[in-house]
Image (tube, rainbow, N blue to C red):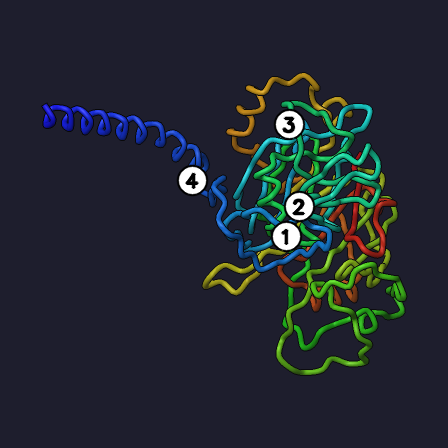
């Protein structure tokens, strides 16, 4: 009888093990929903990211996700109509999740932004001390990405709410200056080749604002900085290039505005110079386009450019339905972004004439991650001495 009892127990355990293995398979399959990019699992291992963000008021941190290190320039894209966030690393899609953006009375602005400050534990100073964990600020007026409740439709006061596990991983992956694009519909980076795009040239030295200024370019000097981060090196006055080994430099940002017929250049959140540009058929719209200089591929020394063209959209289309069912959100998260074409971006570049001396100076400063923004709009009032260019398209 004892032998029979033991055999029954063994059989029961075998059945339970088989049932457990079947239940695990769907969960494992879910992590490989997009096999072409790195999965972001939810079982968090100790995090060892090379960019550290200190917060004196932080509570003891929970176990953070496994290391995510970007391969190239990082882009965060929020589609308001789709209520979706997509993360691109070196032009490749690596992660995607659903979001909740602003309600019609408190809409989320669309345009070109960047991460300007980060805090692991933050509370709103505008809305009843509401918690905003893993906060990444993109405007000083209060718009940020942070973990929050996602009901399946726009429900915030303008911020972009993220799922908690996604917010944590994204917080660890980004740094100050990471580009954030908020568009009425989905956009994606595509490669572009155009002779009018600035071309990088070997750098003899670390070039600064003092070395750039000349009679045609207006140097912007003495602007205060709120940052003391080691990621933002302070310019030093130099009078001539100093031969020596190449140094790691911060990417630059270039803005060509049809509204002002001007070209502006910033480096490390500090404006370097501005100069007039000539735009053919200035009464016709250029659109808004973000060009990014990418790293060269193995075996190919040439740098490459990508572009994202931001579509214009109506206020209603931008805010999306406020009663979108969760099933629709899930479906949208599983779809691939719509194809983009560089045709409009090429047409915009072909109408812009930059001064030769400005092109020369820009070529000396270019490094992977540098961006060129072409827009019908001007610099937003949200831009300041401690931000990159902010261009609001609505």
Identify the mark nearer the N-term, 4 or 1. Answer: 4
Q: Give the labeled residue for mark 2.
A: 346
Q: Nearer the viewer, mark 4 or mark 1?
A: 4
| SS for callout 3 | loop
Distance from disc 2 to disc 1, alpha carbons, whole Å, reads 7 Å
Q: Give the labeled residue for mark 3.
A: 150
For residue 239, say whether it is visible: yes
The quadrant holding residue 49 is bottom right
Label drawn at residue 255: none
Q: Give the labeled residue for mark 1.
A: 194
Find residue 253 and report its horizontal and vertical position in percent: 74, 56
| SS for callout 2 | helix
Horizontally, residue 162 falls left or right of residue 3, namely right
| SS for callout 4 | loop
Distance from disc 4 to disc 2, alpha carbons, whole Å, reads 32 Å
Find residue 214 and report its horizontal and vertical position in percent: 86, 70
Binning the other alpha carbons within 10 Å of mark 4 as few (below 14), some (14 to 19) or many (20 upward) gives: few
| SS for callout 1 | loop
Q: Give the labeled residue for mark 4.
A: 35
What residue lies at 67% left-to-right and 83% top-to-bottom? Answer: 243
Q: Nearer the viewer, residue 207 or 343?
A: 207
Binning the other alpha carbons within 10 Å of mark 1 as few (below 14), some (14 to 19) or many (20 upward) gives: few
What residue lies at 18% left-to-right and 29% top-to-bottom? Answer: 10
The quadrant holding residue 285 is top right
Find residue 239 and report its horizontal and vertical position in percent: 81, 80
What residue lies at 15% left-to-right and 24% top-to-bottom? Answer: 5
* In this view, 356 is above or below 8: below
Identify the mark nearer the N-term, 2 or 1. Answer: 1
Horizontally, residue 347 falls left or right of residue 173, namely right
Horizontally, residue 254 falls left or right of residue 204, namely right
Distance from disc 3 to disc 1, alpha carbons, whole Å, reads 41 Å
């Amino acid at each position: 009888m004892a032998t029979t009892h033991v055999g029954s127990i063994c059989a029961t355990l075998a059945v339970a093990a088989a049932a457990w293995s079947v239940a695990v398979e769907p969960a494992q399959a879910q992590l490989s929903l997009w096999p072409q990019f790195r999965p972001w699992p939810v079982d968090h291992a100790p995090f060892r990211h090379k960019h550290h963000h200190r917060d004196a008021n932080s509570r003891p941190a929970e176990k953070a996700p496994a290391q995510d290190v970007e391969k190239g320039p990082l882009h965060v894209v929020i589609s308001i109509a789709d209520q979706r966030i997509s993360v691109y690393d070196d032009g490749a899609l690596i992660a995607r999740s659903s979001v909740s953006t602003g309600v019609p009375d408190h809409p989320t602005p669309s345009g070109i932004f960047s991460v300007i400050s980060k805090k692991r534990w933050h509370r709103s100073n505008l809305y009843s001390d509401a918690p905003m964990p893993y906060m990444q600020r993109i405007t000083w007026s209060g718009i940020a990405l942070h973990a929050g409740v996602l009901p399946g439709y726009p429900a915030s006061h303008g911020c972009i709410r993220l799922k908690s596990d996604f917010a944590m991983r994204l917080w660890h992956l980004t740094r100050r200056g990471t580009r954030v694009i908020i568009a009425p519909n989905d956009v994606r980076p595509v490669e572009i080749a155009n002779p009018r795009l600035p071309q990088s040239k070997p750098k003899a030295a670390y070039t600064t604002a003092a070395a750039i200024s000349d009679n045609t370019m207006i140097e912007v000097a003495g602007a205060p900085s709120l940052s003391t981060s080691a990621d933002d090196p302070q310019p030093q006055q130099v009078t001539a290039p100093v031969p020596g080994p190449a140094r790691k430099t911060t990417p630059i940002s270039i803005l060509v505005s049809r509204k002002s017929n001007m070209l502006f250049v910033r480096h490390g959140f500090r404006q370097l110079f501005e100069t007039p540009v000539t735009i053919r058929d200035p009464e016709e719209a250029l659109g808004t386009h973000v060009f990014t200089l990418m790293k060269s591929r193995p075996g190919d020394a040439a740098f490459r450019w990508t572009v994202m063209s931001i579509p214009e959209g109506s206020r209603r289309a931008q805010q999306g339905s406020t009663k979108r069912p969760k099933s629709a959100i899930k479906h949208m998260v599983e779809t691939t972004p719509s194809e983009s074409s560089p045709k409009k971006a090429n047409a915009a570049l072909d109408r812009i004439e930059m001064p030769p001396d400005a092109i020369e100076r820009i070529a000396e400063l270019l490094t992977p991650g540098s961006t060129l923004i072409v827009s019908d709009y001007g610099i937003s009032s949200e831009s300041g001495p401690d931000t990159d260019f902010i261009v609001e398209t609505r």
